[in-house]
Amino acid sequence: MFEIGSSLREARVRKGVEIPEVETATKIRGKYLQALEDEQFDVLPGDTYIKGFLRTYSEYLGLDGQLYVDEYNTRYVTPDEVQTIRARRTAQARRQRRVQGGVLVAVLLGIALVTALVIVAWTAGNSSKQDVPGLSTPTTTQHHPRGQAHRSAANSNVAHVTLRAIGTNVYLIAVRRGSPTGPILLQGTELAPGQTKNFKQQRLWINTGTPANLQVVVNGRWIRYPGGKPQAFVVTKRGIFPSA
């Protein structure tokens, strides 16, 4: 166990920032930040807000937000509520796995459909060429862009992914193509605030030690993903999913 409030205050002092500056950066009212440091949790609106403010404030200070939320649950949340929280997390993880499985099936069906259409188009193109007796016409050779069609089908699933560090440095343990065993695209890299890395892949596996400070932009759209302890996740054009 550790003192939630005093550790937050010490981290803020080490960082060299005052409450008004933290308020501007985190959008949390100054009186709530002070209440967190004084552990006057009855001043805040409720458990949901307390946990959200704890996570945001601690991660702004470069601390492990989930660790502070767990400490709050241990000391201030009743056992029945803790069991409810755990059950909710388990149900959420199951739903995410089902969604990921559904997305994979949809992608496979889409690839199969595109492949079938390409084969039909290529076959129809060959059968349209007929020889007419008595009519002499120059023979020309046509090259059907089968490879190009396949490339176009693959490119339709490509995600343009930008990883950007916000607030503090971001440590990228590894970035791989496709899965945890795929080819390594980036490894052991630290991004300074504002620094970016760009990728163009159908499926990108990312393992980071500081997910809360990592902004993920997919095809020009900022995708939100819950921060917390170091974790791995998968990015596709459809969004972000937990790593299996």
Image (cartoon, grey):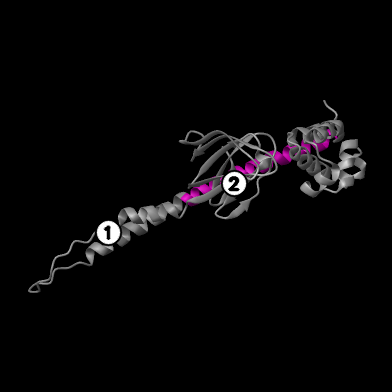
What's the CA distance linking mark 2 and mark 1?
Answer: 37 Å
The answer to whether residue 74 is magenta is: no
Task: Say whether residue 135 is left or right of residue 4.
Answer: left
- Secondary structure at badge 1 equals loop
Q: Quadrant of residue 114 in the image?
A: bottom left
Residue at position x 27%, y 59% in the image: 144
| Other residues around mark 2 within 10 Å, as few (<14) / some (14–19) / many (≥20) | some
Q: Which sits in the foreground, 167 or 101?
A: 167
Q: Amino acid at mark 2?
A: Ile
- The residue to which callout 2 is attached is 240
What residue is disc 1 on? 144
Segment tinted magenta in the rendering: 78-107
User: In the structure shown, which secondary structural element does the residue marked by tag 2 occupy?
Assistant: strand
- Looking at marks 2 and 1 on the same chain, the residue that comes earlier in the sequence is marked by 1
Q: Magenta includes 86?
A: yes
* For residue 116, side relative to residue 160 (left or right): left
